Structures are given as C-alpha cells and as structure tokens.
Amino acid sequence: MTALPGTVEVVLDGELDISTFGRALRRVEAAEDGAPGLLVLDLSQLEFVDSSGVRLVLLAEERARAEGRRVAVRLGSGPALRVFQALGLVEKLEVLPPPPVGEPTPRRT
Amino acid sequence: MTAAQAHGALQRLAVALLGAVTPEAIGRVAVTVSVELLDADAGVLYERADPRTLNSLFSTGWPAELEARYRRLELHRGRPLSDAVLGGTPVWLEDARDWRARYPEMAPIGTSGDREASACLPLRVEDRDLGAIVFSFDTPHTFPPEERAYLEAVAALCAQALDRARLLVVERHARALAERQRDRMEFLARTARLMEAPLSVEERLQRLADLVVPELADWCAVHRVREDEVEQVAVAHEDPARVDFVLRLQERYPPDPAARGGAVEVSRSGTPAFFPDIPDELLVAGAVDEEHLELIRSIGMRSAVVVPLVVRGHSLGALTLVHAESGRRFDELDLAFAQRLAGTAAVALDNAWLYEQQRRIAHTLQAALLPTVLPCAPGLRLAARYRPRTDERSDVQVGGDVYDVVAAPQPGRWAVLVADVCGKGPDAAALTALIRHTVRAEVAHGFGPVEALHRLNDAMLREARDARFATAAHAHLDVEEDGGVAVRLAGAGHPPALVRRAGAAGGSAGMVEADVEAEVEAKVEVVPTSGTVLGVFPDLALRETPLRLDPGDILVLYTDGVTEARGVDGFYGVERVRALVGAPGPWTADSLADALLADVVAFQQGTLRDDVALLVVEVAP
C-alpha cells in the first residue's frame, strides 16, 4: 500500500475509556491540525476500548465531514472490532485492513 | 593609674563584658567593674530607648530617691548627660563649683549628697547612639587627659558590648519572628490538608478547632452561617471538661447574638473583632446576672480575636480564638494570622458547599432521569436497578443510563426502555432526558418500537452535539388473555436481551413440581438488539424481533455496564449474564435483578467503571 499524500495515521494503544478519552482526543486533534485529507485512526492495538473510543471516532468523523476531509479506522480483530460491531458501526465507517508489515506506511503517530 | 594599670583594667573590663549577653547584664558589668577600677562613688549606664528617652540599665551608689527618679529620663539640651548624648562628646565636671558654674539648674541634683565631680560619656558605635555612662565622685576630681582617654576607652568598650547585645536582640527577635512565621505556614498547610479530608463540614470545623488548641489559643470556637441563623458548630479546649462546662454555660445563658465583636456579629458583618486585653468591665457588661458573671470570670478570658470566614466576599461564619489560663495575649500578628487561617478554612468550606450543591443538583437531575417507581402493570412483575459508575474523586453522578416503563394507549400494552448514552456529566444527562421523554411521547402517539427509535434518532440528530450517541432496547409488551405476553423488541446497538424460559430445559414446566424445577437450569434465549446506534446517522438499520413469553418467563434488559464490566477474569460478558439468568430458580423479577446487580458489582470488586442499569420483566406465573 502506498502512502496517500495528506494521510496522517494515529495509532492508539493501551486502554481507551472515559479516563483516557481526553488524552486520546488531544492526540487526534493534534493530528487534525494539519488538515490531512485522510485521517486514519488505528484502534487495532487497543487492549480495551469502550464507547469512549467510539465517540472519539465519531467526533473525528463529524469534524472531517464538516471540513471536507475523510476519516478511516483500523479495527483489527480484537476489542475495537467487537465494540464497533456491537454498535452497528462497521457498515457505517470506512474500515481499513491492518497495515501490511514491511511496507512503507503513512506518517504514524 | 599608670598606663599599664589602665591597660590591664581595660582588658579586665573587656573580658568581663564578653561574658555579658543581655543589655541589663552589660550595664551591670560595665558599671560595677568600671566604678571599681576608677574608684568612683557612683555610676549609671543608660540605654537610648528612643530618640528622646534614656533608660537606666544599671546604677550603683545613688540615693534611692534619685535612682528611682532618674531610672528613665528625657533628653534636654542644657543638662550635662543630655549634652553628652546629644553632642556626642563627654561632659567633665570636676567639682561642685564647676557644676554650679556650667549647669546652675542641675547643680543641686548633680551635687546632692555632697557629690563633687561627674563624668558623662556618650556610648556610640559608628553613628549609632546607644546611651551614656556616668561616673560620680564624692571628692573633686580632675580628669587629666590620660584619665579622659581611659574613661573614653571604657565607654567605647561598653558601647561595643551594648551594640553587640542590641544586634543579638534584634537578630533573636527576627529569628523568633521567622520561626513563628514558619510554624504558622506549617499550621496553614496542616489546616489546608485537614479541610480537604473526606469529612462532613461540621467534622472538619471541629477538627480545625481541635488543631488550634492549645498551640494558637487556649480556646477555639467556630460558628457557621446557615440560612438566616448563625450556629456554633465547634468548640475546643485541651480539657474536655472545660468544653462541657462552656457548653452547659451557653445552654443556660445563651450568648447575646447582638453582642459587639461576638461571633454572631462578626459572622454577619464580616469584620474582625480584636480584644488584645479583656478587662473585667467587659465581662461585667456581658453578664446577665451575678452568677453568670462569676461563671464567665471563671473561664479567665484574657485576650481574644474573632475573625470572619470570608470567601468571595461572603462571610460563612467566624473563627474565635481565646487566650485564658495560659496568660498569653494576642497581638496584631496573631490577628493577621487568624485571618489567614480563617481564609483558608473559608475557601475549603466554600468548596465543600459548592460540592454539596453540585451533588444535590446531580441527585435531583438523576432522580428526574429515572422513574421513582415502576408502574403497576397487571400480568407483569417489574424490577429495575441502577448503579452509577464509581468515581474516585467524587460521588457527583449524573448518569447516561436510563430505564423506563410506561403504559401505551392500547389497553394491556406496556412499553419498556433501557438506553445508554455514552459519556457522563450534564451533556450526557440532557441527552438521557431527551431519550426518556421522546420515547414516552412516541409511545403515547402510538408508534411501534422501531418507529419510535427512528423518531428518537431524528430528535437526537436535531439536538445532540459532540458525537454523543446512545444505544437502546425498546419493546412493546402486550399482556394477552391467556396470561402470556407478545413482545415486539427493537434495539439500536444495544447488548442482547435475554429470556429465561420458565419451562425446564428440555422438559415441560407443567409436568414437574415447583421444588424440582427449582434445581434445574433454565433455558435462556439470547435475543439480539443490535442495529445502528442512535444520534449519529440519519439512516438506521433497525429491525423488530417478535417474541412470545409464557407465564413465568423472564425478560432481562440491561446496559453494557453489565457485559463490559471488567474483573480479574476479563469481561463479564453476555455468557456470564446468560449463566446467571439461567441459574436454578426460583427467581422473581426482584430477586433476579438483585442477584445480577450484586454479581456484576462483586465481579468488579465493588468499583464500577460504568453505570449499570437493569430492567427485569417477569410474566406473572
């Protein structure tokens, strides 16, 4: 996969819940500062994610839509996928596969 | 006296002065040693108390009357001692004739008791005027230059010793002040910590009063303004028996709320009252009768400060400090410190008050979000449970979970709802209220579950901000004539509903005894209520699931605070809910709701990471 121009990827790990939401949101907002054409939020590395993680994605999506940008998510096959599936969101979002190993990837933070 | 003798004498004096630390000791050593060395008949050393006054530090050889009269003297030009001090040069008077010629006015005093010669030497170090030393002789005495030089050397030694002592006093005073300041900063820090303790306001104020005695005051009282009343909330003294005594006294003779400088008046006015000394007249004026006077006298109040607990321009009460049996007196510094202390306490009180307000609002709001009682639905037995997320910082909770049961317009039809708004706080609460009331309205308008959720979604999209979404399970329950219930269940991103079938797994309920049934695991169906979450997308994928419940069947709806609960074994999960719901009965709606809530709470060791809401519907058997 080739890195798209203007693509920024934010990789979140650890736990994403109400107590870590603020920190994660600041990271996403920092990534949005450059108004990337595509913002990829990688939630596949998260050990735990609840509705706070969903809200994080929906907020980014809402802002992107307002500014004519795109947001995509990586959900992997763990907790993030389970939560987004349960909420009926997998069909509603642009979901990307995990980044291929060993190939150049867009700027990941 | 030879030069060698003089030198030796000066050395003796210098050594003697080294041993003297206080100005008084220096005065004594300087006068006694130099009088002896000079063979003088009297001597006195004065310290400059202020620009116009000299105080005697030590004197010897004077008639008692004269000594008493000149223990303290004002400087006046034209008197020998004053001239020496003010002019900075010694005044030598060699005999009575000399006295009369130069100081005719003072001569009768200067020569009383047949005094003849006097030497008045100023004590100076650099430009510092420290006082004077005077020697008198009963015989005429010429002061030859070498003796003058010797006496001036004596004066210089005394002046240096006095200067050293003065500096030492200043330094000690400064150090004492600094130490007091440091102690008090520590005290303030302790007060601040105390006021942050998780105690009630009253307990905190009592602890504050306890902290104050006996270090800062013999007695301490704290008053608090409550609505229109000012009430005493704490009294402290080292001896609890004394506290009892005062409380009994106050019961018998309630303090006059209008008393000037009293805690009530200070609480109301916000102006401190300072009584450095409490004269007996003040007690007399405050006493109701003789017995009262005797009792208040027995407390032995000597000094008091009453400072308001002021924050944001309001007075919340007053802090009263009283010195009694210790005999201590409050000074201006104490007053200033008491005000700081009261300020610290007031800020903490104010925070506590704001917190209590906030908590009250939260509770009120929360109560408005949930039904106070579930309706009585014939043919159904309902139970609901709600437990807010555990917050370590506070128990101020306005939740995002809601449940509701409401009668639909059609007879025998009941609408049930369990919903979960993501996030916490006022925004989440506002959305929770919107959900509850919108669904109620849609039910009243006769809309079915799926349609109601669509309309709720539209309402949320119009109102909601910040990607706040919600999940919901919403059902209509029609109680039919045979006692069974027809269910139409719809969900939006919600954890699945569970149905416990009353009939034993694989068996027929009607064929077995109740006590046998009790030991058998029941069959539990998992009914998905997935679908798209509410409040984000205009188009939703929702569907309705029809169910048939027989008498004794139990429908369990809950929020993800149950399934997403995390314990040491991982997630609680749907499987665990299913196992509990299917556990051998008998169960009622209430006992099952209690058991499930207790299990979820225990699973998380009592700390809930998310709100938990449960709604259990049992079809009357």
Image: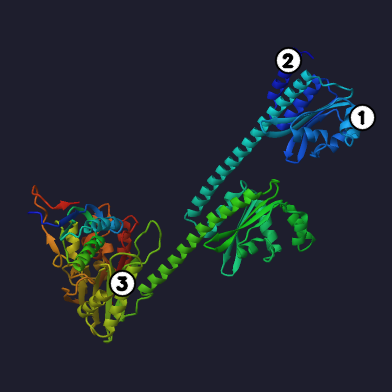
Q: Chain of mark 1?
A: B
Does residue B432 sit above or below B199 in this rendering? below
Residue A30, percent across and down?
24, 56
Q: Is residue B364 above or below residue B100?
A: below
The amino acid marked with disc number 2 is Gly
Question: Image point 8% across, 51% down: which residue?
Answer: A100
Which image quadrant for residue B514? bottom left
Tell me the residue that label 3 is attached to.
B431
The kind of residue on which mark 3 rests is Leu
Q: Position of residue B252 (x, y in %)?
A: 71, 63
Q: Secondary structure at mark 1?
A: loop
Q: Nearer the viewer, residue B261 or B160?
A: B160
**Label 1 amino acid?**
Gly
Instruction: Tell me: B472 left or right of B118.
Output: left
Which circle marks residue B459 in the picture? none
Closer to the camera in the image, A67 or B331: A67
According to the image, label 1 marks what residue? B113
Q: CA distance from mark 3 to mark 2?
A: 99 Å
Tell me the quarter of the picture where residue B20 sits.
top right
Query: Is label 3 in a helix, a strand or a loop?
Result: helix
**Residue B408 appears left or right of A69:** right
